[in-house]
Image (spheres, rainbow, N blue to C red):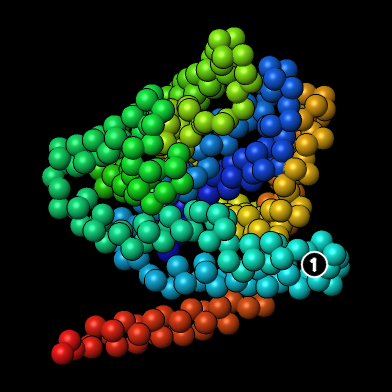
Amino acid sequence: MKRNNSIELIRIIAMLGVVLTHLITIGGVLFNTDFFSLNYFLVEFIQVWTRIGVPLFIIITGYLMYNKKWKIERLIDIFCQVFFWALLFLVVILIVSPQMLSLDNLIDNFFPYFRGYYWYIIAYTGLFALSPVVNIALSTLDKNIRKEYLIFPFFLFSIIPTFFNTDLFYLNEGRSTLYLILMYSLGNYLKRTNSIERFSKKFFLYFFLTNIALAYLGNLTIAYCAAIFLNKQFFFTTQFFYAYTSPFIIAASVSLFAFIMKLKIEDSKLLYFLSSNSFAVYLIHANPLILNLLIRNNFISLSNKNFFICLFSLMLFSSIIYLIAASLNFIRNLLFNKHFSSCSLFIKLQLFKFLNFVFSIKIR
């Protein structure tokens, strides 16, 4: 099946956004930048651009899964990869610098889902479980009702949390299955209705830039008002217009997706290499050991560097992390891909045997 180069490019942009977000927030740059300094405006500006990474990934999933069946092997493979990297990084650190490890590090590494790591995988698992219902709903609803199906949840899960600053539905600013279902449905709708063809590239580009500007200026306004009227500095204690659930971030994500889908992009080995290993970049750099020992608060020094040095360094480090992680996964595929496929198949068969056993038990 021929690859869609636009999709490949979107994957790369999305993952670069995720890496940059982690460098800025977990790396300590954002919270140590002088309030309303030149670097503060820079970091805020980068932040709003990078927030589209997560919604873009889910839009891609919804778009590509139109009229396709989900394969549980894909989900099992993700969990197998998480365990593989956890084990590999533990061995490497034990060899290189065992004094860096603590009991908390070990617990985080092997029980990441219960310690607040890999939230995306947990939410994605929920989406995977509910996707057959979502697909049936989208396919059976007629065109007009399908729009209402998207508009009403958009109001509940985006407009209300953003403008009323309340989390009525426990969306956790987008880190939830409900949010992923919304973005998955948007991607599915774009493919199902062929909506992208109705507007020009210029329209999508302007709409994207407009929503980025609204989110950026909106958050700066809130920060300024908080400093003046509440006498405190505002550093994303609440995401407001930068949250994944923000209507500006959702609109920017959809419009950028549509814009890139209308571009003609030539085949490239580098493009395919970076795209095919993009999700592994997340699994590797978000591993608890990597996140805590190599990223957390290790980029604070950039916060008060020269404006251009800060910008260049953030782009350079995020690119290096991407390339290293992609290369590691490429090597893993060369050495262990067959083993991972066999492992996924084995786990799937055991899971089905267990479910068959459970459902075959007769209640006496």
Residue 132, image x, y percentages: 26, 61
Quadrant for the N terminus in the image: bottom left
Residue sitting at x 37%, y 59%: 126
Position of 279 compared to 64: left or right? Answer: right
Q: Total of numbered circles in the picture?
A: 1
Residue sitting at x 55%, y 73%: 80
Residue sitting at x 71%, y 72%: 88
Q: Amino acid at mark 1?
A: Ile
Residue 299, image x, y percentages: 77, 40
Seen in the picture, residue 122 relative to 357 is either above or below; the reply is above
Report the front residue among 226 and 157.
226
Check disc 1: other Cα within 10 Å, few if <14, some if 14-19, many if 20+.
some
Seen in the picture, residue 282 relative to 344 is either above or below; the reply is above
Residue 363 image-quadrant placement:
bottom left
Instruction: Tell me the element at label 1.
Output: helix
Residue 205, image x, y percentages: 46, 27
Seen in the picture, residue 165 relative to 345 is either above or below; the reply is above
Report the front residue among 69 and 100.
100
Query: Is residue 302 at all visible to an observer of this figure?
Result: yes
Report the front residue among 145 and 181.
181
Residue located farthest toward the top when viewing the structure as drawn: 228
Quadrant for the C terminus in the image: bottom left
Query: Is residue 10 at all visible to an observer of this figure?
Result: no
Seen in the picture, residue 168 relative to 229 is either above or below; the reply is below
Residue 358, image x, y percentages: 28, 84
Residue sitting at x 13%, y 45%: 142
Position of 171 compared to 330: left or right? Answer: left
Position of 236 compared to 91: left or right? Answer: left
Query: Which residue lies under the disc numbered 1?
Result: 93
